[in-house]
Image (spheres, helix red, strand yellow):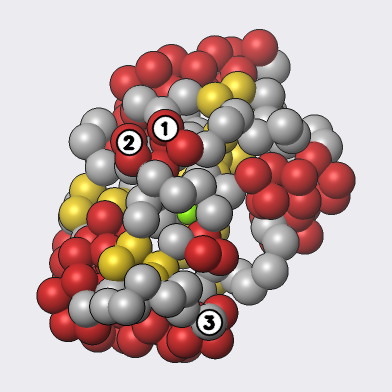
Amino acid sequence: MNRPLLITDCDEVLLHMVSHFAEWLDDEHRVRFDLENGSFADALTDAHGEVLPADQVWRLLDQFFREQIHRQTLVPGAVEALGCIGERADIVVLTNLPHEAHGWRVEQLAGHGIRHEVVCNQGGKGDPVQLLWQRHGRPRAVFVDDLPVHHASVAKHAPEVQRLHMIAEPRLARAIPPAEHAHARIDDWAVACDWILARFKEAE
Ligand SMILES: [Mg+2]
């Protein structure tokens, strides 16, 4: 039988991102990012309290990923959980970044002790999850992500894959309810690790 497969997101699952993005926005751009807003669309405001237009938010995000990813820190328990899961499953990091960022992300994760295949994607994660699942021989599989939109996409395109909603940033986690299309919501890696291993065991 094929080894089980874990497909995990990076930002807000393995590495903290928004808290460092918010700090950098405040330090360098006098932009306030209200992490407890719950809606990214109007969470960033300038020094006058005006909501930043979407194109400006995307430009700042792009600049952060190009120049500031050294600021990102490990989510507690992530490395230990991946170590334990990796003993019995294959692991792929599926991250929504342009393909040109692949090398930066691989190097960044390796610097934190995470050395697994990294796949860059843009848009919904349903199709790439379906492709990875097929490529690995349709094994028992678990998908982990902080964004509800990706759980909906995976539920549609790869319904056989178990879906775990995790938001490792506590301020965001408080503001965002469990994703409708996920099987479980767990924000802590120690608990998530047991849940993932239990899903793999069901298939044995
Ligand atoms: Mg994420």
**Real-space Cα distance between discs 2 and 3?**
26 Å
- Judge left or right: residue 13 versus residue 109: right
Residue 128: quadrant of the picture: bottom right
Q: Secondary structure at mark 3?
A: loop
Around disc 1, counting alpha carbons within 10 Å, would you say few (fewer than 14), some (14 to 19), or many (20 or more)?
Answer: few
N-term-proximal mark, 2 vs 3 = 3
Q: Which residue is mark 3?
A: 53
For the residues carrying marks 3 and 1, which lies nearer the camera in this image? 3
Q: Residue at x 23, y 83 (%)?
A: 29
Foreground of the two, 174 or 137: 174
Report if the CB atoms under discs 3 and 1 are less than 8 Å apart: no
- Count of labels shown? 3
Give how far across and how far down residue 7 sits, in percent.
Answer: 56, 46
Residue 152: mark: none
- Judge left or right: residue 76 versus residue 146: left
Q: Residue at x 66, y 12 (%)?
A: 202
Q: Which residue is mark 1?
A: 174
Q: Amino acid at mark 3?
A: Pro
Q: Residue at x 43, y 16 (%)?
A: 194
Q: Amino acid at mark 1?
A: Arg
Q: Is residue 81 above or below residue 157?
A: above
Q: Which residue is mark 2?
A: 170
Q: Secondary structure at mark 1?
A: helix
Q: Quadrant of the N terminus?
A: top right
Q: Is residue 53 above or below residue 33?
A: below
Residue at the far front: name it.
48
Q: Residue at x 53, y 82 (%)?
A: 53
